Image: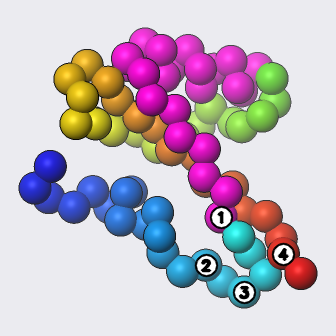
Amino acid sequence: MSEENPILSGLNAPCTPNREPVKVVLMSSPAGVREAIHQLHDARFREATTWSPLLPTPEPGIVMSINTHYRITS
């Protein structure tokens, strides 16, 4: 991947004070990632609409999606 992906470039971006990013990454076939996203939504773990679009990986046929949640730190 020669161009930098804006979603991936934010993985190590600094966070505001008292907030820590918690990132959940799903990697599988496109159908597998979509199914897992909907299962996590049904389990009330993460909203289905808050996941990134399906992103390519170096492995053919495998994509990923990222969900970032922010937790409050002391």
Residue 41 coordinates in the image, percent (x, y) = 71, 27
Q: Position of residue 45 (x, y in %)?
A: 78, 34
Q: Which residues are magenta?
A: 21-42
Other-residue count near label 1 (Cα within 10 Å), few / some / many at <14 / 14–19 / ≥20: some
In the rendered structure, the answer to whether residue 39 lies left or right of residue 34 reads right
- Marks 4 & 3, CB-CB < 8 Å contact: no
Pointers 2 and 4 in contact (CB under 8 A)? no
Q: CA distance from mark 2 to mark 1?
A: 7 Å
**Location of residue 15 with respect to 4 vertically, above or below:** below
Secondary element at image label 4: loop
Q: Position of residue 22 (x, y in %)?
A: 67, 57
Distance between the Cα atoms at labels 1 and 4?
A: 10 Å
Q: Which residue is the site of mark 4?
A: 73
- Does residue 37 appear to the left or right of 55 in the view shown? right
Outermost residue toward the right in this view: 74
Q: Which amino acid is tagged 3?
A: Pro
What amino acid is labelled 1 in the image?
Answer: Pro
Magenta stretch containing residue 29, yes or no? Answer: yes
Mark 2 residue crowding within 10 angstroms, few (<14) / some (14–19) / many (20+) = few
Q: Which residue is mark 3?
A: 17
The residue depicted at 27 percent of the width and 57 percent of the height is 5
Q: Quadrant of the C terminus?
A: bottom right
- Return the disc, 4 or 3, that comes first in the chain's sequence: 3
CB contact under 8 Å: marks 2 and 1 = yes
